[in-house]
Image (cartoon, rainbow, N blue to C red):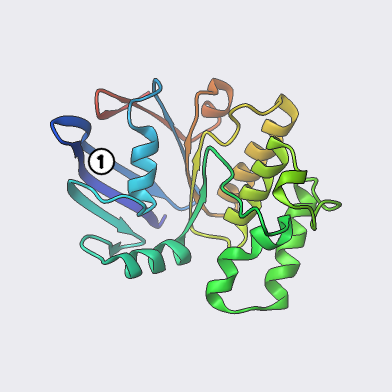
Amino acid sequence: MTTVLDIRDIKKFYGSEVILYDVSLQVKQGEMIAVTGASGTGKTTLLSIIGLLQETSAGHIQILGESVDGLDAAKRAGVRSRYIGFVFQRARLVGSLTALENVLVPSWLFGSGTSYEVRARQVLTELGLGKRLHYLPEQLSVGQMRRVALARALLLNPPLILADEPTNDLDPATAAIVFGHLQAAQQEGAAVILVTHDEEFAAKAQQVVTLKNGKLSAG
């Protein structure tokens, strides 16, 4: 099976404060890894580093065998747009764009096309938002905005999906919908890294790791 993500000896410091220390992790195609741990242990920082939104203090990252060490901001953005779908704790939708337009944002880097819109409409409909395609974020509930953000992450069928507490603060039914689509993406071949406090969802991952005192351990 293809290794989608390979991080080695990642370190992250803020001054004298150690956030991550010698963190290593491999995720293969079609595999879901759940990252658990108490609040404030660096889980979001780890995802931001993997998602090339933050730089490491030391260590190495490869995505599909391609090293991203030392890339400038423009090249990091290019790798991120090609390979990574990111579901943040907060939806981070553009307030002036409709739900459909927000989902289409990643495709704008590759030019317009009806195939992208067909895909966006399909995913939003599968997520129960088929009647809200043209709603602005202010017209959507928290759960609906989270589903729009998930659809945006899934639009281009990225090989790597990073989900930071995607079911947090959602009602059980909506949480199950969101997790179900992450699981479907994994079953279709994506590598998924899921940060979660939900033990039920974590137990469905192929591997569970815990971040504590800046270090990653199994279980």
Q: Residue at x 52, y 60 (%)?
A: 158
Which quarter of the image is occupied by the N terminus?
bottom left
Name, please, the residue furthest toward the left: 16
Q: SS for tag 1?
A: strand
Residue 172 is left or right of residue 70, and the answer is right
Which quarter of the image is occupied by the C terminus?
top left
Q: Hey, which quadrant is residue 188 in on the image?
A: bottom right
Counting labels gives 1
Q: Residue at x 53, y 73 (%)?
A: 109
Q: Position of residue 143 (x, y in %)?
A: 70, 36
Q: Position of residue 140 (x, y in %)?
A: 75, 43
Label 1 amino acid? Answer: Ser
Check the image and report above or below for 33 versus 53.
above
Residue 155 is left or right of residue 87, and the answer is right
Check the image and report above or below for 35 versus 219.
below
Q: Residue at x 76, y 59 (%)?
A: 122
Q: Residues within 10 Å of mark 1 (few under 14, many from 20)?
A: some
Check the image and report above or below for 47 versus 165.
below
Q: Residue at x 18, y 48 (%)?
A: 59
Q: Position of residue 157 (x, y in %)?
A: 58, 61
Name, please, the residue furthest toward the right: 131
Say which of 3 and 135 sits in front: 135
- The residue to which callout 1 is attached is 24
Residue 179 is left or right of residue 199, and the answer is right
